[in-house]
Amino acid sequence: MLYVSQLINALQLGSIYALVALGYSMVYGIIKLLNFAHGDVIMVGGYIALFSLTALAFPPVIAALITVAGCTLLAVIIEKLAYTPLRFAPRLSLLITAIGISILLQNLAQLIFTANPRSFPTQMLIPAGSITLGGIQLGFVPLITIFASLLSMAILTFLVQKTKLGKAMRAVSEDMGAAQLMGINVNTIITFTFALGAALAGVGALLYAAGYPRIEPTLGMMLGIKAFVAAVLGGIGSIPGAMVGGYLIALLEVLVISMGLSQWTDGAVFLILILVLMVRPTGIMGRIQMEKV
Amino acid sequence: MKKNRILALSIAVMLVIALLAGCGTGMPGAQNAGNAEGEVSIGVLAPLTGPVAQFGVAVQAGVQLYVDQFNAQGGLQISLEFFDEEGQAAMGVAGYHDLVDRGVDAIIGAVTSGVTMAVVPLAYDDNMPMITATSTHANVTVDADTGAVFTNMFRSCFIDPYQGTKMAEFAYEVVGAQTVAILYSNEIDYSIGLYEAFEIRANELGMDVVAVEIFPDEAIDFRSQLTNIAAADPDVLFVPAYYRHIALIGPQSVDVGLQDTVLMGADGWATILDFMDDGSSLEGAFFMTGFSPEVEDPLAQQFFADFNEATGTAPSMFAAQAYDAAKILIAAIETALAGGATPDDVAPFREAVIAAMAATDINGVTGHITFDQYNNPQKTAVILVIQDGEERLWGTF
């Protein structure tokens, strides 16, 4: 019984990690960029959700749509303004730019919203309550978190596997030059990838805020880093890998905490990162890339 | 060539003179000497921004109110120098040096125990009179390594062991708990102090400590710990932590099915409902505090009204304790001045202020205050209960 409850905890946390890790993985898959500003897009999403629920008093569905749309718009703007001009620059310049955007967003948020944390009105998004199944109490928040993430991931898989856009995305990630020669508009596809990753981040922001109702400018930092580790563990660039990685990292954290070693949670996650990079840098599901001659 | 050398020399001389002049103005104590009315400068170390800003802002408001009221009486004038230490030990140390450079005669602060404990050894070496309104860790006034008392350091709040002990007794006598669990952070000195005292007293009283779980200071997910606690099904869960943790622990405890367990906390919970959008998850929780406006005491009532008028908000416990801290310190400064000490004679003045503080025996808004041999105040605890989404007075205990 205790194990099942702990498993639910891990699934809830893992769902959020997986959603965020997907954004990392997809962007890396397509332009080889570790988008370190991704976590901060989630932070902005948290504030958008907070204000559309409280100050603007929108109904939950509208507020959720605004949050997802806001995150998507922000990511597209970042991509157009900061990353597109560096398309043919060295990868390192792109990485440094991403870190710069991350610092910019965090400090802007601190300037506008102050460093003081704000409480998130979870009940305005997901009603309080729980159901009891076989002696195990399941809160609405964890249930909806798990369900909403699985649904988002199913939609994503459909988009990537079954639609023309998804096919083009996979083609660009395989070989950008060849894709361009075959008539695929690479710029559109890259923007679409950012938008898709950010939409998932928007869902992640909503679920994160509902589960951990404390919004602050540095919210995205640790979440982003954990999701990055999840993406690396799953195999960066791989979509199913990011999902698996997210759930595995959360399982590990819950395991460490439930053994009474809670101060080692972050340490254990980063140990995994080091081990993966040392033993199998392509992660669980990453492709081993051949050097092209 | 020679001309250039002369020019260089004269510039150098000018710079040195400017530097010396700068030093002169850097010592406000010397400037104050000629002031017939007398002016004393008090530094305040408090986190005005950052994760514990709510505490710092309340302390600032409490001190400001007392000083404004005091200055309005005429005679001795108090000037305040604030430094925002952001709740960080390193910033606290920087702030202490900055306040000393600004020439303060005594210090109120810091706010959280971790910061105050970083500053105290420096203040002790300088014999700087210091009083904190909120730092409750035992080692704020006693050196952890040597056991020696920091004679210059006082406080107007309860100490951690006292709160932990009191809450264990409350759980046993009032709640009637047989089994208790504790969730604390081993990265927060305040939390550790309360946890240890609570566990010791709980064992002495014969209650069963069925679960002890820990969390890192920056944790946002407490469900795993709470799930373990829920499995042990305790009568009482004691959470000695700050409002920013409780705001997350409250709703998450309901998620894992802990709603039949009585949550209990200490003064780190103060102002918790201001911070929570929905306090229903804490319904029925008890926590200890140093002040409640509902306590029938004319001084407390008067303070409540004055604070409300000055700021437009109700005072928190921190504001009340800060008000008392300012009162204790300024009363001691008056005693020292009456005894012939002057702020210009830094060492004897500090000594006189400290001696006067040690002999404190006054009625504050948080009760009658005297200090024990460890410079900790002796006063009764106020217990609050969360009912219908509001903090209500349960009574004194």
Image (tube, rainbow, N blue to C red):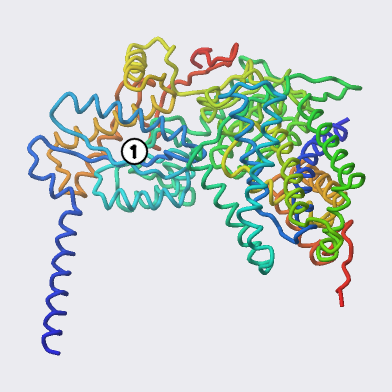
Element assignment for label 1: strand
The residue under label 1 is which amino acid type? Ile
- Residue A182: quadrant of the picture: bottom right
**Residue B80: percent from the left, percent from the top?**
27, 38
Vertical comparison of A85 with B48: above or below: below
User: Of residues B175 and A21, which is closer to you in this image?
Assistant: A21
Q: In the image, A175: left or right of B245?
A: right
Q: Which residue is mark 1?
A: B108
Vertical comparison of B225 with A266: above or below: above
The furthest residue to the front:
A183
**Residue A16: percent from the left, percent from the top?**
76, 40
Protein chain holding label 1: B
Q: In the image, B305: left or right of A277?
A: left
The furthest residue to the top:
B296
Q: In the image, A258: left or right of A244?
A: left
**Residue A267: percent from the left, percent from the top?**
71, 54
- Pointer 1: residues within 10 angstroms few (<14), some, or many (20+)? many
User: Of residues B65 and A116, which is closer to you in this image?
Assistant: A116
- Residue B74: quadrant of the picture: top left
Q: Residue at x 73, y 20 (%)?
A: A127
Count of numbered circles on the image: 1
What quarter of the picture does the N terminus of chain B occupy?
bottom left
Vertical comparison of A103 with B323: above or below: below
Q: Residue at x 25, y 35 (%)?
A: B356
The furthest residue to the bottom:
B1
Q: Residue at x 34, y 27 (%)?
A: B323
**Residue B28: percent from the left, percent from the top?**
18, 48
User: Of residues B149 and A200, which is closer to you in this image?
Assistant: A200
